[in-house]
Image (tube, grey):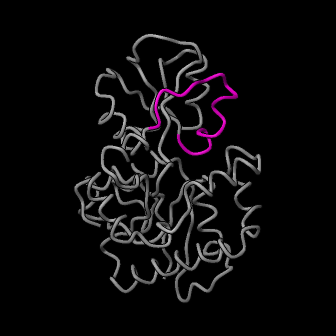
Amino acid sequence: MTLKLHISPCPNDTFMFDALVNGRIDAGGLRFEVEYHDIEELNRGAAVGRADISKISCAVLPAIAGSYTLLDSGAALGRGNGPLLVRRAGEAGPVRRAAVPGAHTTANALLGKLFPEIEERVPVLFSEIAASVERGDYDAGVLIHEGRFVYRERKLELIADLGQLWERRTGLPLPLGGIAAKKSLPERVRREITGLIRKSIEYAFAHPGASRAYIREHAQELDDKVIDAHIALFVNDYSLGLGDEGRRAVETLTGVVP
């Protein structure tokens, strides 16, 4: 069986899926046609059922729950990994207009929950947000992926760590994203995919250097320290399996029971 797999080009996804995509583990009778998209494009694709298996923002789950189910493996979920709200260093005054990495992203949903006073949230490609805030196009911006680690180089300063605010409010880890599979796939196939993703992540943990060329081929930031920090932050035990706490976190954010 050949399945369409859509993931993001960010280091956590390429780290987790390297072994599966590049034949380092045995996928049995399953084959995967892989495409790479920005997270908001992945969310839009899931809304119209483009892929059999897709990375998604957890915040989009309510809109796609009729056709997709969240898999137990492959999540970007944890503590201390939240999106960062930043502005130009030394700026003062209220934030009225903020750049966000897509209307359907968890980052945008969090900003709306935690900072309802921000009047306008403008979708911008995640890799362009830091530069747009530096230019003064927006009062502030929400950074995800590699942008979290390099914003100070652009003379930006932190307003708030949205993940920390979430954790203080709920006591739960923050569910940023996950891997969703079409409900139309047979349950045994969904279980097999979940197991393969777990095996792929286990391989990545056991052979951390094996995926480096694949990661660098797709990464926005090529500095090895940034890549390593990104992976360490977003790939963890919750990626192997959500567990009870991870499932509670997803349900608290979305109202959908995974």
Furthest-bottom residue in view? 28
Q: Is residue 44 above or below residue 26?
A: above
- Foreground residue among 57 and 164: 164
Q: How many marks?
A: 0
| Residue 249: quadrant of the picture | bottom left
Q: Is residue 11 above or below residue 101?
A: below
Q: Residue at x 58, y 39 (%)?
A: 148
- Identify which residue is drawn at 46% across, 78% down: 193
- Look at 68% across and 50% down and name the residue there: 219
Depth check: give the residue in front, 53 or 132: 132
Image coordinates of residue 111 in percent, x first then y, are: 37, 34
**Residue at point 26% right, 61% down?**
65
| Quarter where residue 242 is shown | bottom left
Q: For residue 160: magenta?
A: yes
Magenta segment: 144-161
User: Which quadrant, please, contains the C terminus?
Assistant: bottom left
Viewer-side residue, 2 vs 23: 23
Q: Position of residue 155 (x, y in %)?
A: 65, 22
Residue 127 image offset from top left, x and y in percent: 59, 37
Give the left or right position of residue 26, taking residue 106 as reference.
right
Q: Is 9 placed above or below 102 here? A: below
Of 16 and 175, which appears nearest the observer?
A: 175
**Left or right placement of residue 165 versus residue 17 in this view:** left
Q: Quadrant of residue 234?
A: bottom right
Residue 4 x, y percent position in the rendering? 49, 68
In the shown orientation, is residue 173 left or right of residue 204? left
Q: Is residue 199 magenta?
A: no
Judge from the rendering whether residue 181 lies leftward or rightward of residue 230; answer left or right: left
